[in-house]
Every structure is written in structure tokens, then in C-alpha cells.
């Protein structure tokens, strides 16, 4: 099965389950910028285990692994800061644009800084081991990952750059988006004596097990007629499921072209793909929207335009009446158009035609062997972190309107965890993620000096970020700055066009705020 993961960061493409841009046009644009960059890869010998006395990592190892990094000194002048872009759950190449036209380029140019991207452990080519068994993944924790950042800042060498730029003598300012945003925050708080400051963009600092709020911005800001139609269709399907009407449910599957799918939850997930999740999807969703055309995906808008097409032919609209006998004669408005989209856009992705399988692009998840493959991959690494510390399983809400079927609950995702990570000799995962490993850094009460939080109010991950609707009131200051981008999405400030004045106002002002914030911090060192 090949699919995308709903990673708090990038949409992820996977052989098992993680990270490429969602559309060909955006992908090619980024590839062109990467090719133009031609950054030279470097490595540092990073300890696999930073905590030789912690029982959590027994038996310990003194071995190291080659952790990759690239840097850009285009704007650097002696005395300037170092900006460490936290690579997150992907490989280095997919982050190159942030050195060229994104937030790091913006900050480097404004302050004569040097930019560097560090590839996260267990991603790209920075794997400690040749495979990723449960035991070998034991060192993939938030604690070890942020320790990498501090060690790197103290020991890295920048070939061709005169002088020692190690921390804390040189001010190191971290930046990360989404999961990397949380790692930025955790790093600055834990290693504040080494790392000078950081900007956490859409930093997912709050771990929860079930996260139905992922769909809230879509409910609130999506096209109202499209959203209302999906809500009503989902509600009708839920009623059939609750009534255990197997005949009607099978007819429904056939309408969507998914008749062979044996697991009802797999069916529920597949028809939810255009909306996102739970956890994975093959096309762009609300999360993949962006303020700049080169970075965005129009898949969500295409889906809603299809569902609300008032000029659809009768051959499609007549489908709305096929299940009416099961709902007292009431038609299922827009069902035909919803199903038509799934049949034309989603179903063809299953190239083998074996709908109920884990073949590439197909739609079954019921294959324990498939998940237990220990081949190194970003997908497997991300799934491990999700299953052990991060949680945030996308589920249907307990009540009220829903964009996904109610059968999609925690047990569905947790099953993948159980299959993927069986007990090892010395490491095993808990029945559900141990959220305390993540939340003990501060959770929604997070605070650290020279740590800026910036979020978007239309982000699907907002309620696990600093500006969550569940968070206490936020007040900004130079030492503890915060910024909420009106109409902003998931770490939208990380993207740039190398011309701030040409950006949309709401992004331009966010970038100018980040420049002012960093300059204020640097001024305190003079």
C-alpha cells in the first residue's frame, strides 16, 4: 500500500506509510530550486545515545551515526548568527528551498547570518542502523532528537568558513515548522544555555491521543455548501452502520467503486481521502493549501467543486436516489458527485485493481506483514514517533457534524502501531502513546526565553499548537513573542519568494515581525 501520511508538517508519501509535495506542479517547482542550489552534503558523527545513564535506553551504546547537514553562507559576515533549520520528518533535499527563498534566507539576509539544515535522526540518510526494528528504533525519541540539536551546535564544522561558529559563543537561533517547530521549542527550553533562541512555527507542543479537531478548520472555513453536503452524507452512512444494514452498506461501497473492501474502516478512510485522513491520504487536503501557488495544492478545491457542481449530468445526480429507500425516501443530496470524484480520482490510484489489498495505491490496511517491514523509511520512523509519544490520531468527533465516519476511532490507528512494532528484546511500545514523554516539556503552558511562537488560525493542527483554542490567553513581549497569522495555514511563514515586499500582506507582516524579533534578541548581546 502506498499512501500519504497526515504529518504535522508536510504531506508525506510513503511505501509503508511519509514526505513529498502533494502535486506535480508544486513538486517540480521545488525540484528546480533544489537543483539550482547544489548544496554540498556534510556529516557529523552524532552519538546514538546521549543519555548513557537513563534506564529508558538500556542497553546503552557508545556508537555514533553519520548525521547529514547542509549550510548556506551566502549572506554570512563575521559576527553574524547561525540559523539552524530543524529538518523534521523528511530528508534534507525537501528543505533546501528554506535556505534559498524561505524563512532562513529571509533571516540570513536581514542579519548577516549563516543558515544550516540538520537532517533529523532516522530520516533521509541519517539512520543509526541499517534497518528499523523495534529495538533499533528505541533511540528515536524527542529527548534524543533535541539533544542532537544541542550537540550539533557545539561540535559542527563549516568547511570554508573562518573562525569557530559553535554555540554558545555564536548565537544559534533555531527554526522549525510543525513537529520540527515543537522540537525547536523543546530544544530552546532544555538547552537554553547553549542555544540562544528559536522560532516555533505551528509547533505541535501539545500531545493528545485522539484529535478530532483536525477537521475543525475545514468545517469552519471550507465552502459551506460542500461541507454541509459531506456532513449530511456522512450522517446518513453512520445511520446505516448503526442499524447494521449490511445490504445497504454494500450497495454504498459499490456506488463509490469500493465494493471489494472488506473492512468498513478502510472504506471510511478511503472516502475521507479528499478531506484528509485519518493519518493518510493520496491527494492534497486542507493541510496542503498555501499562500503561494508554487507550494499549494488545489485538490481540496477541486473536490468541493465536484461535490457542489450544479450542472452535473443526470447520470451522476440520479445516484442520489439509489439509497433513498433506506432513508424513508429522502434522497442523498450530492452523493453521486461525491462518489464520482472518488471513482475518478481515488480509485484509479490502485493500479493493480486489487481494491482490498495493500498493493501500491490500493486501500486495505489489514495486512500485519506489510506494517512489520523493518526497512528504513520516513514513514516507519514517523509512525513510530506517533505510536510512542505524539499521538494525535485523527478520529471522528463524538457528537455533532462530522466529515468522516464515526467508525474511525483510536483503535483503527493503534492497530497499525501494534502490527508495525512487535515486542523487541529490550524495547516495546505501550498500548497507546505515552504522552507524558512529550507533554512534560511544558504542554500548552510552554514558555522559554527568546522563543517565539507563530501559528495560523486556519491550521488543522492549531489545537495542538501554542495558540490552541484550549490554551490560556496569550500576551506577547520581546522575550516571549507570539503571533497568530489571520487566515494562515500550517507553518505558512516558512515559505518565501525572496521578495518580502511582493508577498501578500498577511505573510509579509509575519516575516517583518520575525525579522524585528530576531534583531531585538541579537541586540541584547552587544
Image: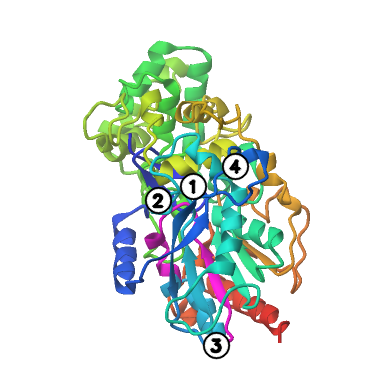
Which image quarter is the N terminus in? top left
Q: Which residue is mark 1?
A: 7
**Cα separation between marks 3 and 1:** 38 Å
Front residue of 401/263: it is 263
Mark 4 and mark 1 residues within 8 Å of each other at the beta carbon: no
x, y (%) of residue 33? 33, 70
Distance from Cα at disc 4 to Cα at disc 3: 40 Å
Mark 2 vs mark 3: give the one in front.
3
What residue lies at 58% left-to-right and 75% top-to-bottom?
Answer: 509
Q: Nearer the viewer, mark 4 or mark 3?
A: 3
Report which residue position mark 3 lands on: 78
Q: Magenta segment, which residues?
A: 79-98
Indicate the position of residue 409 as horizontal and vertical percent values: 55, 28
Q: Residues within 10 Å of mark 2 (few under 14, many from 20)?
A: many
Give coordinates of residue 504: x percent, y percent.
50, 73
Residue denoted by label 4? 390
Tell me which numbered mark, 3 or 1, is placed earlier along the sequence. 1
Q: Secondary structure at mark 3?
A: loop
Q: Nearer the viewer, residue 398 or 183?
A: 183
- Label 1 to label 2: alpha-carbon separation: 8 Å
If you read the primary sequence from the N terminus, does the residue marked by circle 1 or circle 2 appear first? 1
Judging by the rendered image, the residue that carries numbered circle 2 is: 19
Amino acid at each position: 500500500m502506498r499512501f500519504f501520511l497526515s504529518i504535522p508538517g508536510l504531506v508525506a508519501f510513503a511505501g509503508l506509510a511519509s514526505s513529498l509535495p502533494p502535486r506535480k506542479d508544486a513538486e517540480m517547482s521545488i525540484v528546480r530550486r533544489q537543483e539550482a542550489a547544489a548544496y554540498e552534503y556534510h556529516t557529523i558523527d552524532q552519538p546514538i545515545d546521549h543519555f548513557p545513564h537513563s534506564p529508558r535506553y538500556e542497553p546503552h551504546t557508545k556508537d555514533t551515526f553519520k548525521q547529514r547537514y547542509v549550510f548556506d553562507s551566502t549572506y554570512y559576515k563575521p559576527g553574524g548568527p547561525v540559523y539552524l533549520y530543524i529538518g523534521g520528518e523528511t530528508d534534507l533535499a525537501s528543505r533546501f528551498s528554506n535556505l534559498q527563498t524561505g524563512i532562513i534566507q529571509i533571516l540570513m539576509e536581514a542579519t548577516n547570518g549563516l543558515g544550516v539544515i540538520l537532517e533529523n535522526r532516522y530520516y533521509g540518510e541519517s539512520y543509526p542502523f541499517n534497518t528499523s526494528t523495534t529495538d533499533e528504533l528505541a533511540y528515536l525519541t524527542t529527548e534524543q532528537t533535541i539533544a542532537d540539536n544541542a550537540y550539533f551546535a557545539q561540535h559542527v564544522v563549516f568547511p570554508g568558513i573562518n573562525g569557530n561558529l559553535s554555540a554558545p559563543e555564536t548565537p544559534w537561533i533555531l527554526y522549525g515548522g510543525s513537529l520540527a517547530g515543537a522540537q525547536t521549542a523543546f530544544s530552546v527550553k532544555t538547552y537554553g544555555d547553549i542555544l540562544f533562541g528559536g522560532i516555533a512555527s505551528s509547533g505541535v507542543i501539545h500531545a493528545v491521543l485522539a484529535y478530532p479537531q483536525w477537521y475543525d478548520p475545514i468545517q469552519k472555513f471550507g465552502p459551506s455548501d460542500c461541507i454541509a453536503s459531506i456532513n449530511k452524507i456522512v450522517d446518513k452512512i453512520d445511520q446505516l452502520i448503526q442499524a447494521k444494514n449490511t445490504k445497504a452498506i454494500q450497495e454504498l461501497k459499490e456506488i463509490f467503486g469500493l465494493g471489494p473492501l472488506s473492512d468498513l474502516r478502510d472504506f471510511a478512510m478511503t472516502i475521507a481521502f479528499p478531506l484528509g485522513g485519518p493519518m493518510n491520504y493520496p491527494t492534497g487536503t486542507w493541510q496542503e493549501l498555501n499562500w503561494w501557488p508554487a507550494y499549494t495544492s488545489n485538490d481540496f478545491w477541486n473536490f468541493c467543486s465536484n461535490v457542489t457542481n450544479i450542472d452535473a449530468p443526470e447520470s451522476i445526480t440520479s445516484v442520489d436516489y439509489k439509497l433513498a429507500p433506506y432513508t424513508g425516501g429522502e434522497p442523498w443530496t450530492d452523493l453521486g458527485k461525491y462518489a464520482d470524484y472518488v471513482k475518478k480520482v481515488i480509485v484509479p490510484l490502485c493500479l493493480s485493481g486489487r481494491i482490498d489489498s495493500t498493493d501500491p495505491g490500493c486501500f486495505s490496511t489489514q495486512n500485519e506483514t506489510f506494517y512489520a517491514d523493518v526497512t528504513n523509511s520516513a514513514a516507519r520512523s514517523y509512525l513510530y514517533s506517533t505510536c510512542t509519544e505524539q499521538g494525535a490520531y485523527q478520529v471522528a468527533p463524538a457528537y455533532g457534524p462530522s466529515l468522516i465516519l464515526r467508525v474511525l476511532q483510536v483503535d483503527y490507528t493503534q492497530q497499525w502501531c501494534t502490527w508495525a512494532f512487535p515486542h523487541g528484546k529490550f524495547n516495546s511500545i505501550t498500548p497507546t502513546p505515552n504522552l507524558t514523554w512529550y507533554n512534560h516539556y511544558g504542554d500548552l503552558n510552554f514558555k522559554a526565553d527568546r522563543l517565539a511562537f507563530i501559528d495560523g488560525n486556519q491550521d488543522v493542527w492549531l489545537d495542538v499548537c501554542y495558540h490552541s483554542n484550549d490554551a490560556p490567553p496569550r500576551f506577547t513581549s520581546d522575550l516571549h513573542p507570539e503571533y497568530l497569522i489571520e487566515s494562515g495555514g500550517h507553518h505558512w511563514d516558512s515559505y518565501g519568494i525572496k521578495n518580502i515586499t511582493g508577498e501578500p500582506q498577511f505573510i509579509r507582516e509575519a516575516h517583518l515581525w520575525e525579522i524585528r524579533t530576531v534583531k531585538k534578541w541579537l541586540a541584547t548581546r552587544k
